[in-house]
Image (spheres, rainbow, N blue to C red):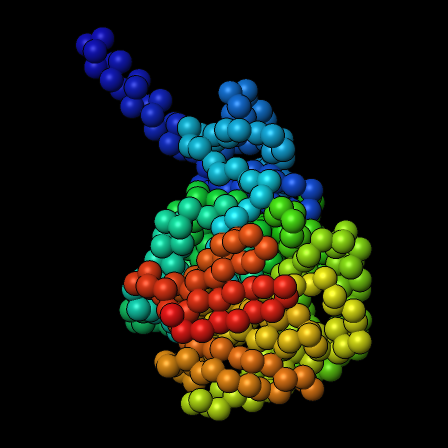
Amino acid sequence: MKALFALLAGLAIAGAARAAEPAAAWVEVTGRGAEVRAVTSAGACPHLTVDGRRRGMSERAGPTEAFPNRICTAALPRRARAVRLAGHALPLPKTRSNRIVVLGDSGCRLKGPLVQDCNDPVAGWPFARVATLAARQKPDLVVHVGDYYYRETPCPAGEAKCAGSPYGDKWDTWKAEVFAPAAPLLAAAPWVFARGNHEDCHRGGAGWFRLLDASPEVRACPAQSDTFAVEIGGTRLLVVDSADPDDFRVIPDQEAAFAARLDAMDALRKGEPAWLVTHRPVWTLMRKDQTLLDGLGNVNLRAAVKGRDLKGVDLVLVGHVHNFTSLDFGDARPPELIVGTGGDIQDPNDLPPPAVGPVSIDGAEAQAFTMGRFGYFVFDRRGADWIGAFHDLTDAVIARCRLHAARLTCAKA
């Protein structure tokens, strides 16, 4: 009988431990440094073990009807060598990031009659595979260029492609969109999160500010994310919120607000080479077969950068357009790289093969490379250069790039 009681007690303890284990945990890099964030249904925030010492986490946000759990946070000491949460090791930031995974536009679209096959992780919505493959690259850092939340409306009745899917700006949806499929990649490296237009205050703003925004406090909509800098060793990532500016209508207040965020970026450069990381591209192209034309979009961003000194910005790293595109403007402008390939529906105009050639965009000539693919991009530091590779869903490298002295060249592998 004592043995039975011992067994039952052991099972109860194990069950309680599982119940207390966070629903999600990750390391996020902000302008203040790295911090651990965790989502828990327990009555209090968990404790970390940092270099063998127990360390408490503080509550970032308490339970609400849409988010019936609490989010907890703890700053990581700069020289921390080992961090564990609920027995699991967490990735630590490196002083010098030499391998960076880039991806964006990763959620599964449910909006009225537009229904993506969220229940097909191979061909319908492959974000989980993208994240798993990217984790195997053992990156030092992951940069997500925005658009995580796409399940805005319920799955239509009888539709097998999304049957059982959560929807709306709430925890179950964010778990399905980000934390469940991206778990291997969240465990592999710290992340830098940029805010996309799907995280604006008309869609996923509440979840964004609660879960991923870099600010130490949870902001209530209407709100914007602060511009911040991340040091990766000889280069700084300058993360700028572009969730709100309209793509095609000139709205002076939106242009002025984005220009002010660029002003804040200028103050953070500190004389180092910099990459501007934001969601919406400043420059876009349109493709029809192999013909390339100015995309004529993002008018408020274009107006905000016009006449601005962007010397020292070696790269503009963005998403929003659901393809892989590089634009090199020579000495006229910084090059731009679009990696909107994480899993959301792609434009059929971007089907293979890649389109390559010159294109005039907003008054400047660019050399372009563009293709539609699901996958992820890896940047490896090689001396003063960055060598890039785009991987598809078979993990084959199908495009290679080189960033040298603020010039970007990409070509079919």
| Apparent side of residue 366 relative to residue 346 in the rendered image (left or right) | right
The residue that appears at 80% across and 62% down in the rendered structure is 263
Return the residue found at the far front.
Answer: 383
Name the residue nearer the viewer: 361 or 129: 361
Vertical relation: 364 (above or below) 262: below
Tell me: 292 left or right of 108: right
Q: Please tell me which residue lies in front, 237 or 173.
A: 237
The residue under the point 51% across, 84% down is: 357
Residue 32: image quadrant is: top right
**265 displayed left or right of 189:** right
Q: Is residue 373 above or below residue 376?
A: below
Quadrant where the N terminus sits is: top left
Asked whether residue 124 appears in the rendered view, the answer is yes
Residue 128 in view (yes/no): no
User: Where does the C terminus fall, quadrant-wise?
Assistant: bottom left
Q: Nearer the viewer, residue 174 or 380?
A: 380
Residue 342 found in image quarter: bottom left
Q: Is residue 109 above or below residue 103?
A: below
